[in-house]
Every structure is written in C-alpha cells, then in structure tokens.
Amino acid sequence: QLQLVESGGGLVQPGGSLRLSCAVSGSSLDYNAIGWLRQAPGKEREGVSCISSIGNTNYEDSVKGRFTISRDNAKNTVYLQMNSLKVEDTAVYYCAAGPPVVFRYCMSPLVFTSWGQGTQVTVSS
C-alpha cells in the first residue's frame, strides 16, 4: 500500500523560503506521478506542481519561477522548494500520488489515488 508523509511546513515571513518533503513508501517514484496540492481556508484544493514518473514537471501559473519540484529516487522522496513566498501561498500543502498517466491532468486533485496527511504553510509578517 502506497503511503505518503509530508514534512517541512511552518511559519515564514513574506519573501522567505521553505522546502517541503514528501516521503513515499510502498511504491517507487518510477511508477508514480507525484503532485503537490494545497488548500487554503474556505477554498477548494488546487494543484501547485507535479512531477512525472520520468521526471517531467508542471507548475500552476502563480508559482512558476518561485517553486521548484524535484525528486530523489534513492530516498523515494519528492521535494517542493518554495521561494519568494507570498501571503496568498498560505495553505495546507498535500502530496499525492497517482499512476503515471495522470501527469497530463495533475493540476486536478481528482486524478490522485493516494494522499498524505498535509503540512501547514503559513506566510505572515
């Protein structure tokens, strides 16, 4: 059974940086598309970034140039480096996994089959 565990959230000032980690167990990253999604209070869950089973990446427009998704196959872990954070980035961030074919649609939460528990990111002065 595939399990995902997020870590790295916290409180940061606007303009600051955080790195989120998603440790995956039960299946190799080579067989999964992994996404980072977020949900702010009162809003729907939305896709932020994703990485395919072969390392292709995709980003939501508002985070392009600020966030970078990457993976370490040896550690079976996916990272989300978040720079130049804004107040509007405040949300619970989730990592999620799905079969490789979902990468094309990975900005939609509906395509993912396994989810982590989420980690809170708060950007505030």
Image: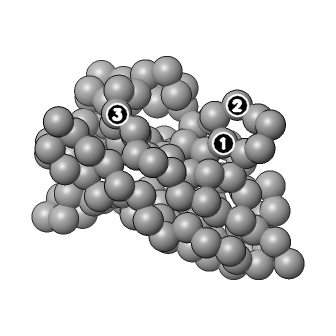
Question: Would you call the spot at circle 1 few (<14 residues within 10 Å), some (14-19), or many (20 or more)?
Answer: some
* Residue at 72% in and 56% down: 89
Q: Quadrant of residue 75?
A: bottom left
Q: Are marks 1 and 2 in contact (CB under 8 Å)?
A: yes
Q: Amino acid at mark 2?
A: Glu
* Residue at 26% in and 29% down: 100
* Residue at 45% in and 48% down: 117
List x then y, in percent, for residue 14: 79, 74
Residue 109 falls left or right of residue 96: right
List x then y, in percent, for residue 84: 70, 71
Against 116, is 114 above or below?
A: above
Question: Would you call the spot at circle 2 few (<14 residues within 10 Å), some (14-19), or many (20 or more)?
Answer: few
Against 83, is 34 above or below?
A: above
* Residue at 22% in and 39% down: 2
Q: Nearer the viewer, residue 28 or 62?
A: 28
Q: Secondary structure at mark 3?
A: strand
Q: Nearer the viewer, residue 5 or 99?
A: 5
Q: Earlier in the sequence, mark 3 or mark 1?
A: 1
Q: Which residue is mark 3?
A: 114
The numbered disc on residue 39 is: 1
Residue 112 in sight from this viewpoint: yes
Q: Earlier in the sequence, mark 1 or mark 2?
A: 1
Q: Which residue is mark 2?
A: 44
Against 2, is 16 above or below?
A: below
Q: Amino acid at mark 1?
A: Gln
Q: Earlier in the sequence, mark 2 or mark 3?
A: 2
Q: Residue furthest right?
A: 125
Q: CA distance from mark 3 to mark 1?
A: 16 Å
